Image (cartoon, rainbow, N blue to C red):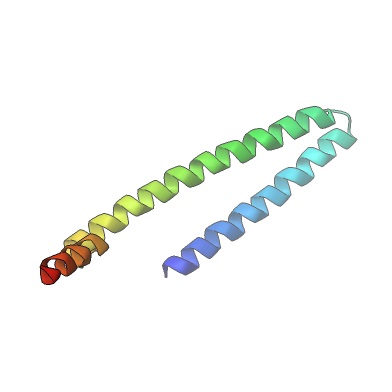
Amino acid sequence: MVKELLYLGVGAALLAKDRVEAKLERLVEEGKRSKEEVAHLLEEAKRRGEEEEHRFREELKRILREVIQEAGVATKEDIEELKRLIER
């Protein structure tokens, strides 16, 4: 289910990107925006998208840690600690 949600999000983002780029190209063709302005807008949108992706990933990690902790699943650190205790 998580995989499908991720695919849906990526697909929606790509569709939106294509539509924005097409609209910006039309603005250049109509003389309403310069190529430099459009390049700047696209770069700014890319930067903001990367920031959002980073925030999303961090929030997802936090949620997953909570779920794992509540489920009582052993973490890598738990397993490593057990290995150290056994080796003593």
Side of 28 relative to 67 (left or right): right
Using residue 31 as the reference point, say whether residue 52 is left or right of it.
Answer: left
**In terms of image quadrants, where is residue 84?**
bottom left
Residue 2 at x, y = what percent?
Answer: 42, 66
Which of the pair 15/79 is nearer the observer?
Answer: 79
Rendered-image quadrant of the N terminus = bottom left
In percent of width and height, residue 64 lies at: 31, 58
Image height of 11 relative to 59, above or below: below
Q: Residue at x 76, y 34 (%)?
A: 39
Q: Is residue 4 above or below residue 38?
A: below
In the rendered view, tell whether residue 52 sits above or below residue 76.
Answer: above
Is residue 14 left or right of 32 when viewed as pictured?
Answer: left
How many numbered discs sit on the rendered protein? 0
Residue at (70, 37) in percent of width and height: 42
> In the rendered image, which quarter contains the C terminus?
bottom left
Q: Nearer the viewer, residue 73 or 88?
A: 88
Q: Would residue 62 be seen by someone viewing this image from the given angle?
A: yes
The picture places residue 10, in percent across and down from the top left corner, at: 57, 58
